Amino acid sequence: MCAAQPGAAACPKDYMLIPRIITAVVLLAMLLPALFATNSSPFAALTLVLIAAGCWEWGRLNQLGFTASVVAGVAVGAGLAYVWWLAPHLLVEYAHMTRALWLLGAALWVLGSAWLLRFGMTRWLGLSPTLRLAVGWLLLALTWLAMASAHAVGVNFLLSVMVLVWVADVAAYFGGRAWGKRKLAAGISPGKTWAGAFSGAAAVMVLALVWLWLDTQLAPDSASIYTQLWQRSPLLMVIGVLWLNSMAVVGDLIESLVKRCAGVKDSSGLLPGHGGVLDRVDALLPVLPLALMLVTV
C-alpha cells in the first residue's frame, strides 16, 4: 500500500491518473465540436485518424513490423477517406447497397468470436498471420464506416449506440465489484464476472426505456436506435439491445485475448493513461456495425 504519511512518495496510480485525465480532456475537446458540427466531415476525419491508428496497433499486435504497420494504417485510412470524401452521403442515400457490409460484419463477429472464445489462444496463434491481419483491418474499416454512417444519420442515433456501450461498461464494473464472484472468462480477462455482465444488461435496458421516453419529449435530430427498433417491434428492441450489450462484452474479450497472445498489457501507448486506441474502442468495434445492421436489414 502507498504511504499515507506527509512527505511520503505518491502512489504510482496517482501518477497514472494525471495523464489519464489530461488525455480524456484533450480527446473530448477534439471530439465534441466535431460530433456536433453541422458538417459531418470533421467527425469523419477525426475518427478516421483514430481508426488508422488502430490499424497500426493491430499490425503490431500480430507481429507486423513497425514500418509495415504504419503503411497498413495509412493505406486503410486513405482507402476509407476515398470512399467518404468522394461520396459523402453514399452510405446514407444508398443504404440498400451497404446492408451487405453490416451483414458481413455481423457474420464475422458472431461466428468468429464464438469460434475464438471456444478454442482460445492456441487456435488464434495457429491461424495464418496474413488472415489475422486482413480480418482485423476489415473489421476496423467496417467500424469506421458504421460510425461515419451513423453520424450522418444523426447525432442522437450515434450517441444512443455509443452510450449503450459506455453505460454497460460502467454498470458491469460496479456490478462486478459489488457481487462478482463467478468469472466470465478467467483465462482471458480475469476481471470480468457474470454479475458484471448481468448488471450491464440491466443497465442498458433501463437506458433504452429512458431514451425512448426522451425521444418523445424532446425534438432530436434523429430517432435513437431504441426508437427505431421499438417502432418495428418492442420485442425486437429488447432482443436487439441485449444482443448489442453481449457483443460489447465480446469485443472487449476478443481484444484481451489478442493482447494476451501478443504478450502485452495495452494495444499501444498512444493515449497516455489509457493505453492504445483499441483499448478504448474494443467494445464499440462489433456494436457499431451490428447496430446499423439492426436498423437497415
Image: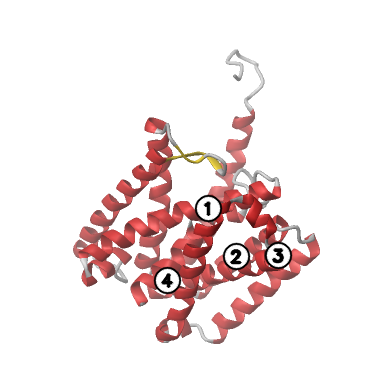
Viewer-closest of 123 and 95:
123
Mark 1 secondary-structure assignment = helix
The kind of residue tagged 4 is: Ala
| Residue 39 pos. (x, y %) | 46, 76
Residue under circle 1? 118
Mark 4 secondary-structure assignment = helix
- The quadrant in which residue 180 appears is top left
Q: Earlier in the sequence, mark 2 or mark 3?
A: 2
Residue under circle 2? 51
Q: Earlier in the sequence, mark 4 or mark 3?
A: 3
What's the distance in space between the residues labelled 3 and 1, CA to CA? Answer: 18 Å
Residue under circle 3? 128
The kind of residue tagged 2 is: Ile
Mark 2 secondary-structure assignment = helix
Is there any visible trace of residue 147 in the rendered image? Answer: no
- The quadrant in which residue 3 appears is top right
Note whether 241 is above or below 173 in the view shown.
below
Q: Earlier in the sequence, mark 1 or mark 2?
A: 2
- Of badges 2 and 3, nearer the viewer stands 3
Residue under circle 4? 150
Residue in the picture at 60% in, 78% down: 81
What's the distance in space between the residues labelled 4 and 3, CA to CA? Answer: 33 Å
Tags 4 and 3 touching, CB below 8 Å = no
| Residue 41 pos. (x, y %) | 52, 75
Report the side of 219 relative to 285 (left or right): left
